Amino acid sequence: TFQPNQHSSINPDHLSYFRFVGRIVGKAVADGFLLDAHFTRSLYKHMLGLKPTHHDMEAIDPDYYKNLKMIMEYKLADIGLDLTFSTEDHSFGRSQIIDLLPEGRKIPVTEETKAEYVSLVCQHRMTTAIQSQIKAYLDGFYELVSADLISIFTPKELELLISGLPDIDVHDLKKNTDYQGYKATDKEIGWFWNILFSLSRSEKAAFLQFVTGSSKVPLAGFSELQGMRGIQKFSIHKAGGAPGALMSAHTCFNSLDLPVYKSEDEMREKLLYAISEGATGFLFA
């Protein structure tokens, strides 16, 4: 998936290129042509005038997201972090401190304010640091497609509008799936594949978006499914916690956390709810 690079200014004409890409995408949408191109969820949100959330960071930088999750889940003193409302930018051999609030480098992050810190640092990474690139791309796109015309869509629906509904070979996905905590012969896994085979084409696309962050099907099949660190097959993990809990996904690792369910019908209900709501990630208190 594609995301604007904050260091693209190394090329003096970079904004012209972003505007050109925006025009290409806009022209395809206006003329009803599909593109074999997929963008990050945060960029689709920018196209719709929506604000990205901390959940969207996972698909961009999973290690950074994991660190933010640790900040939210543990006390700062316990993990030895002494933070201020600032962040460091490393580019072309130079480092600089960027304030997330006025004089942010002088304002310590506390247990009471760490949720605000995480929100601001995500906003910087996904919006502020690439603001000029996003604006150039959107200027090009809106030349051909009015923002009002696409405002009825969700980010997932916008991806399907631009890239089309994929043909998903469930047999190929099943053949290229790893299991952790489950065995391929477990009844729960049998239920899972029964459900997946029975889904409609649009529901299969929604499932793929849920577990990988994109509806894109690899050209060489699911044996070549890409994660954040190269080829990373789809995997199903046995989730702990209370039986009947909601399933969750980790899009950067193409993995699904599948709890234990009492029946195939219950699993179907939870799966359909998960792919329609897409509720993943950690929550702020």
Image (spheres, grey):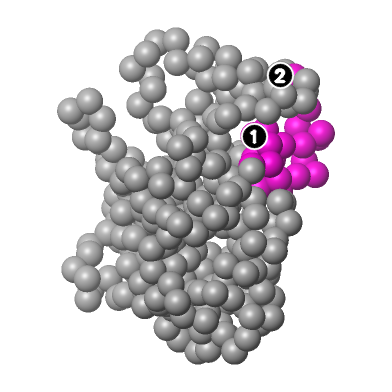
Range shown magenta:
144-166
Q: Secondary structure at mark 2?
A: helix
**Residue under pointer 2:** 27
Q: Is residue 146 magenta?
A: yes
Number of numbered discs on residues: 2
Can the viewer see residue 156? Answer: yes
Left of 212 or right of it: where is 230? left
Residue in front for this viewpoint, 155 or 92: 155
- Above-or-below relation of 81 to 143: below
What residue is at 64 percent from the left and 69 percent from the top? 195
Give above or below for 106 relative to 137: below
Residue 190 percent coordinates (x, y): 54, 74
Horizontal relation, residue 69 to residue 43: left or right: left
Which of the numbered marks, if any, corresponds to residue 163? Answer: 1
Position of residue 212 measured from the top left corner of the image (x, y, whole percent): 50, 52
User: In the rendered image, is residue 49 in sight?
Assistant: no
For image coordinates 35% across by 26% down, the residue present is 7
Question: Badge 2, how many Cα within 10 Å: few under 14, some, many 20+?
Answer: some
In the image, residue 178 lies at what x, y percent?
38, 63
Q: Distance of mark 1 from mark 2, alpha carbons? A: 13 Å
1 or 2: mark nearer the eye: 1
- Residue at 33% x, 17% y: name it: 10
Q: Amino acid at mark 2?
A: Lys
Figure check: 131 above or below 250: above
**Label 1 amino acid?**
Ser
State the SS at label 1: helix
How far across and how far down the image is residue 76, in percent?
27, 71
Q: Residue at x 33, y 66 (%)?
A: 71
